[in-house]
Image (tube, grey):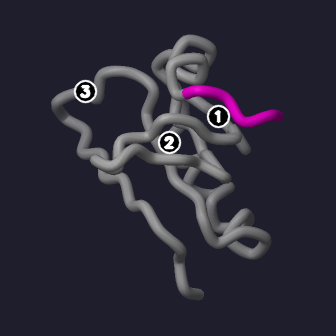
Amino acid sequence: MDIKSIEDIKTKFKDEWVLLADYETDKYNALISGKVIAHSKDRGEIYNLLKAELKKRKKLCIKFMGSVPQEEVAVMFYGEIQV
């Protein structure tokens, strides 16, 4: 999949968890674009895929493309991961 704007990704994968690579952020660290590696309504599935992708890539992020339910906590990390 090609690099897409965050607005296009939100529209296509509404209310899903998305694993992104090759992402870009603005000066406030807000996502502006990225390459969708995987998407799912199941957060656990995306986190499991993250483990496999970390063997190939170091710069990844996970983002929920909707309103986060109040009972959920979502944290987004930017930057390279040292394994």
Quarter containing the N terminus: top right
Residue corresponding to mark 1:
39
> Which of the two residues, 1 or 42, is positioned nearer the viewer here?
1
Looking at this view, name the residue that lies furthest to the bottom.
83
Q: Is residue 53 above or below residue 69?
A: below
The amino acid type, in three-letter code, at marker 1 is His
- How far apart are the alpha carbons under marks 2 and 1? 9 Å
* Stretch in magenta: 1-5
C-beta proximity under 8 Å, tags 2 and 1: no
Q: Main secondary structure of the magenta part?
A: strand
Mark in front: 2 vs 1:
1
User: Could you tell whether 50 is left or right of 31 in the image?
Assistant: right
Whichever of labels 1 and 3 marks the residue nearer the N terminus, that label is 1
Looking at this view, name the residue that lies furthest to the front.
27
- Give me the residue at 55% from left, 12% from top: 11
Residue corresponding to mark 2:
43
- Give me the residue at 72% from left, 63% from top: 53
* Secondary element at tag 3: loop
Residue corresponding to mark 3:
69
Is-magenta flag for residue 14?
Answer: no
Q: Quadrant of residue 67?
A: top left
